[in-house]
Amino acid sequence: MRSFAGRNILSTKGFERAEFDHVFAVADELEPIARRRRNTDLLAEKTLVTAFYQPSTRTRLAHESAMHRLGGRVVGFSDAKMTRAGDFYQESIKDTVKMLEYYGDVLVMRHFQQGAPHEAARWASIPVINAGDGWGEHPTQVLTDLYTVQRELGTIDGLTFCCIGDMRMRTMHSMAYALTQYDAEMIAIAPPEMALTDEFKAELAEQSFVIREVDHVADAIAEADVIYMEPVVQADYTASRQERGDDVGTTPENYRVTRDVLRKAKPEAIILHSLPRMDELPPDVDATRHARYWQEAYNGVVMRMALLALVLGAME
Ligand code: CP
């Protein structure tokens, strides 16, 4: 297995099975720190730089919280409009990163352009973590999600993931790449205009990973061990920011997980949603035995602790 020290976390593509296992084991080791709400000094000499060109609640703050839990420092921006990259100068990723690499020891970047963190990694002398790039990928979220599945269900092998929502979403791409490493099935349920592309399906088929596509959640939910959700009513992830209009529309029943449709689910099936949600997951589902998205949010801090400790070489 390759060492994580100094490594970029840009994609789950190419992540090996042993690497997932190792990251989960390190997360398990660090989890008591988060559970006890204690801070340690594991990364006391280190600084995290956050460069968020798109809004975020969870990903940025979970990384920042993780860094604080491990005793490190944080600098960064959450609104590129307040930097030279977002004003008259439109400073390039290269020029921005050639500054940021001197301000800290690891860079976490979210960007509306697919591939922007990869571009940053070309120029940075410090590890770069992809916190979501356009419609590209969201590897730290999916590591969090699979860690949650592992903890909640004790395995990932042998499970059926019923993935509902916009298949163009970065989480869906990272999830499909990750599941190629497991003996798991993925069922995709998405509106036709948000379906998996033929190119993506062909790429996965090369790894003998074939995704079944179904029209309505009611036709697949009985098979699901993991109900993995994203909205279909959502912002354009290729834009730096999108305000909410008056008429955002509603989610068709095909892509909603309600208490009613959950009557068909296995008793032990769990629901994950990286959030934020719209009407595809009504709040009254929160009280069901299936909801695990708050646990997923907690694990988001634990997973970022593990990743920061690994790429900064504090854990082997
Ligand atoms: N899950 C997730 O990426 O949330 P944020 O957009 O709030 O970071």
Image (cartoon, rainbow, N blue to C red):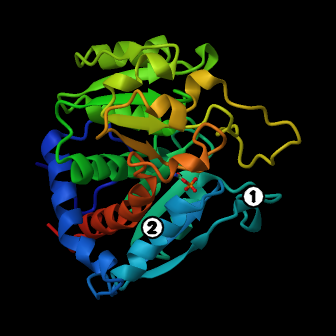
| Mark identifier at residue 120 | none
Circles 2 and 1, Cβ within 8 Å, touching? The answer is no
Task: Give amino acid for label 2.
Answer: His
In percent of width and height, residue 289 lies at 38, 49
Separation of marks 2 and 1 at Cα, in angstroms = 23 Å
- Name the image quarter holding the C terminus: bottom left
Residue 264 lies left or right of residue 28; in this view the side is right
Choose between 192 and 315: the one closer to the eye. 192
Comparing labels 2 and 1, the label whose residue is closer to the camera:
2
Specify the quadrant of the image occupied by residue 80: bottom right
Specify the quadrant of the image occupied by residue 27: bottom left
218 to 91, vertically: above or below: above
278 to 194, vertically: above or below: below
Q: Judging from the image, what secondary structure is the residue with disc 1 in? A: loop
CB at disc 2 and ligand 1 closer than 8 Å: no
Is residue 61 something that shows in the picture?
Answer: yes
Q: Judging from the image, what secondary structure is the residue with disc 2 in? A: helix
Is residue 9 something that shows in the picture?
Answer: no
Choose between 213 and 66: the one closer to the eye. 213
Query: Which residue is tagged 2?
Result: 63
Mark 1 residue crowding within 10 angstroms, few (<14) / some (14–19) / many (20+): some
Query: Which residue is tagged 1?
Result: 86
Mark 2 residue crowding within 10 angstroms, few (<14) / some (14–19) / many (20+): many
Residue 121 lies left or right of residue 308; in this view the side is right
Task: Give amino acid for label 1.
Answer: Gly
N-term-proximal mark, 2 vs 1: 2
In percent of width and height, residue 182 lies at 19, 32
In percent of width and height, residue 121 lies at 43, 52
Residue that appears at 78% across and 58% down: 89
Residue that appears at 60% across and 44% down: 282
